[in-house]
């Protein structure tokens, strides 16, 4: 399954901007030579507008790029033009899914419920049903399906996704969909934690105050793509991508701290098993 192209579009945009600067051209000087407006070239260089291989060939000619570099950039252009699998489900490239699709590692602190990548379909369905966002029955089932598809990368041989999850203990006791479904969710959590790509740690309630009390968050890493880490936060009114370096670094530090005070993976599994037995 192809991942999609959002991060690759960002890579391409950055590359084209660097090539223009290296060629000693300003946007104002380069744009008319490409039959562009300066605003269009700016949008391309900021990944706000896509480009095809014909346009990129013209840009590479102007910037005097050839050889292997020419071939690499044209291949990146083709990859950046590909549509992600989520498009078939009526979703665009503006949300979280396209970013996760190109990520190599997800670090997620979950405060109120089990992370999406570790949810059963029944558990996810209940969460969607109780959300502030109204959904038709059709959209609800679509969203559940999309969530299940996302999980496939955890067991992918070609493009595995590593998940490091720290989950507040309280989430284990919040029964969603009835006790039988909640037991099934907790059992699934134990099963997922056995995967080589998944690390599950429970943050016990008796830790007391900690920086995660400010709310749940996710940090995405893109190993091998040359992209910096990115933060992501959901809130009742929507969601927010965080790209400012100092903010993302702070989130990584907070996550590492939460991981250090959470139970070990083995201790976490033992706690989940006890919760299942008591439920």
Image (tube, rainbow, N blue to C red):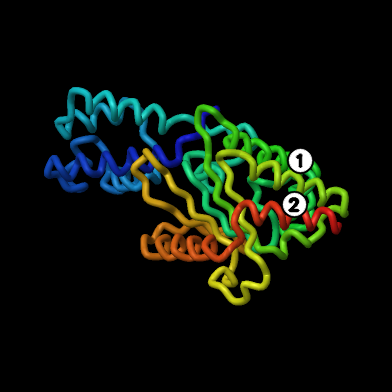
Name the residue carrying label 1: 141
Horizontally, residue 134 falls left or right of residue 58, namely right
Circle 2 SS class: helix
Q: Quadrant of residue 31?
A: top left
Q: Residues within 10 Å of mark 2 (few under 14, many from 20)?
A: some
Horizontally, residue 144 falls left or right of residue 254, namely right
Q: Is residue 276 above or below residue 260?
A: above
Could you tell me how far apart the alpha carbons at marks 1 and 2 are, in whole angstroms? 9 Å
Q: Quadrant of residue 62?
A: top left
Horizontally, residue 65 falls left or right of residue 184, namely left
Horizontally, residue 5 falls left or right of residue 27, namely right
* Relative image position of residue 205 (x, y in whole percent): 68, 70
Circle 1 SS class: helix
Q: Is residue 143 above or below residue 174?
A: above
Residue drawn at the location 51% of the way across and 27% of the way down: 158
Residue drawn at the location 53% of the way across and 56% of the way down: 218
* Relative image position of residue 32 (x, y in whole percent): 20, 40
Image quarter in which the N terminus is found? top right
Q: Earlier in the sequence, mark 1 or mark 2?
A: 2
Name the residue carrying label 2: 128
* Relative image position of residue 80 (x, y in whole percent): 41, 33
For the residues labelled 1 and 2, say whether their Cβ atoms are less than 8 Å apart: no
Q: Residues within 10 Å of mark 1 (few under 14, many from 20)?
A: some
User: As rendered, which of 110 and 137 lies closer to the eye?
Assistant: 110
């Amino acid at each position: 399954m192809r991942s999609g192209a959002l991060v690759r579009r960002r890579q391409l945009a950055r590359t084209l901007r660097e090539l223009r600067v290296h060629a000693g051209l300003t946007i104002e000087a380069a744009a008319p030579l490409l039959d562009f407006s300066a605003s269009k070239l700016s949008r391309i260089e900021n990944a706000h507008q896509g480009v095809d291989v014909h346009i990129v060939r013209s840009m590479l000619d102007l910037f005097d790029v050839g050889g292997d570099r020419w071939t690499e950039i044209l291949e990146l252009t083709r990859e950046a033009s590909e549509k992600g699998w989520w498009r078939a489900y009526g979703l665009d490239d503006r949300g979280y899914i396209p970013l996760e699709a190109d990520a190599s590692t997800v670090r997620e602190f979950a405060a109120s419920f089990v992370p999406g990548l570790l949810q059963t379909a029944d558990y996810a369905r209940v969460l969607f049903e109780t959300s502030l966002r109204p959904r038709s029955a059709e959209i609800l089932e679509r969203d559940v399906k999309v969530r299940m598809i996302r999980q496939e990368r955890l067991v992918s041989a070609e493009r595995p996704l590593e998940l490091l999850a720290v989950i507040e203990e309280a989430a284990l006791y919040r029964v969603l969909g009835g006790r039988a479904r909640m037991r099934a969710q907790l059992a699934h959590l134990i099963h997922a934690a056995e995967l080589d790509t998944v690390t599950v740690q429970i943050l016990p309630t008796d830790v007391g105050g900690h920086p995660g009390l400010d709310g749940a968050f996710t940090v995405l890493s893109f190993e091998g793509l040359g992209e910096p880490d990115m933060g992501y936060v959901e809130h009742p009114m929507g969601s927010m991508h965080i790209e400012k370096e100092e903010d993302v670094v702070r989130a990584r530090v907070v996550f590492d701290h939460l991981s250090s005070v959470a139970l070990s993976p083995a201790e976490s599994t033992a706690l989940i098993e006890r919760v299942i037995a008591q439920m």
